[in-house]
Structure formats: structure tokens, C-alpha cells
Amino acid sequence: MVQTPSTEPPGSYYALPSAGPLPPPPAPRIRRKGLMIAGWTVFGAFYLATVGATAITTVDVSGGPDAGYCFESSCYSEPETDPRVYRLYIPVVGPFMAIPAGWKHGIRSLIALPGVLQLSALTMAIVGTVQYVRDGRLPQRVGADGFRLGKRLRLGVAPTRFLDGGTLVLGARF
């Protein structure tokens, strides 16, 4: 038996992989929820503390026969209480709206402090909620026409015409 020499260089042949068992399914993803829970809890605590402090400082404690009732045009508990203080009951923006009620710079900064704390806690809660929602989604797979950005919007990459580079393609169907 005579062997004919091969024109292919040695090692140019490869064996196809055998069809073995399928790989196990991926483990379920763990959803991050700590930042979301902490953010909403801290926001609620700061808001309730602001509302409680405002209610305590503006309540009429005289105990007279007219306590808690409004017979005149003003329904505020004390004549010295600035009506702008009641804006503290509004979450997040209320403390910033109530800043002019302070008569000194130190008092104004104390009025703004709950707003800053509520805003930072709300930011933390929103970021945590976005992380939690994104962790629940399935990972995106790249199709032949790129990543799916929307219902009819795709983002992908493609080679240039002469294969000397690449292009970023944003495609929409309508």
C-alpha cells in the first residue's frame, strides 16, 4: 500500500468535538436588595422624624378653651409660628421651601438639614431599586443584528467594507 503525500501542512486538520452531555443550566442570579431596603427605610425614618419634630414644635400646648380650634383667619397654633414652617410636611422639597422661615443662618441650616438627609436617602433608595430590577432581568444576548435596546432599536458592530476596521451601528425598524 502506497501513501500519497499530503499537500496540506501537518496539523491543519482538527477533529470536531463529540456531542457530549449538555452543560448544566446556570445558577440563579442573586438579586441585590440591601441598598434598596436600606434606602427606603432610611428615607421613611428621616421623613417621619421631620414630620414628628415639626408637629411637636408647632402644636399648641396652652391647653386653653380655644386650643386646637380656628376662629380667626389664622389657624396656626402660635402667633409666632411662621406659616412657612408647615412646608416641612412635604417630603424632600419641603425643607428647602421652608428655609426662609428661619431668622438666623444657623436656624436656616437646621431647617435645610432634613431635606439634605431625605434627598440622600431617596437617592440611595432609587439606585438600590434600579439595581434590584436590573438583577431580575435575563442577561442580553447578542443577535445577528446586535444588542436590543428597545422594541425596534438595535445597537451592534460591523466590519468596514474593506475589512480594515469596524463601525458602530445603531439601527431602527419602523
Image (cartoon, rainbow, N blue to C red):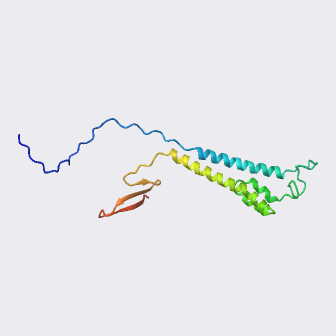
Q: Going by the picture, which residue comes out furthest to the left? A: 1
Q: Position of residue 129 (x, y in %)?
A: 58, 48
Residue nearest the observer in this picture, 6 or 61: 6
39 in relation to 156, above or below: above
35 in relation to 173, above or below: above
The quarter holding residue 87 reads bottom right
Tell me the residue at 52%/48% (across/down).
134
Q: Position of residue 21 (x, y in %)?
A: 33, 35
91 in relation to 2, above or below: below
Locate residue 64 relative to residue 164 in the image: left or right. right
- Quadrant including the N terminus: top left
Tell me the residue at 31%/64% (across/down).
164
The quarter holding residue 14 reads top left
Q: Position of residue 98 (x, y in %)?
A: 76, 59
Q: Number of marks in the image?
A: 0
- Quadrant including the C terminus: bottom left
Residue nearest the observer in this picture, 151 or 63: 63
Tell me the residue at 90%/57% (across/down).
72
Q: Going by the picture, which residue comes out furthest to the top? A: 21
Tell me the residue at 5%/42% (across/down).
2
Q: Position of residue 35 (x, y in %)?
A: 59, 47
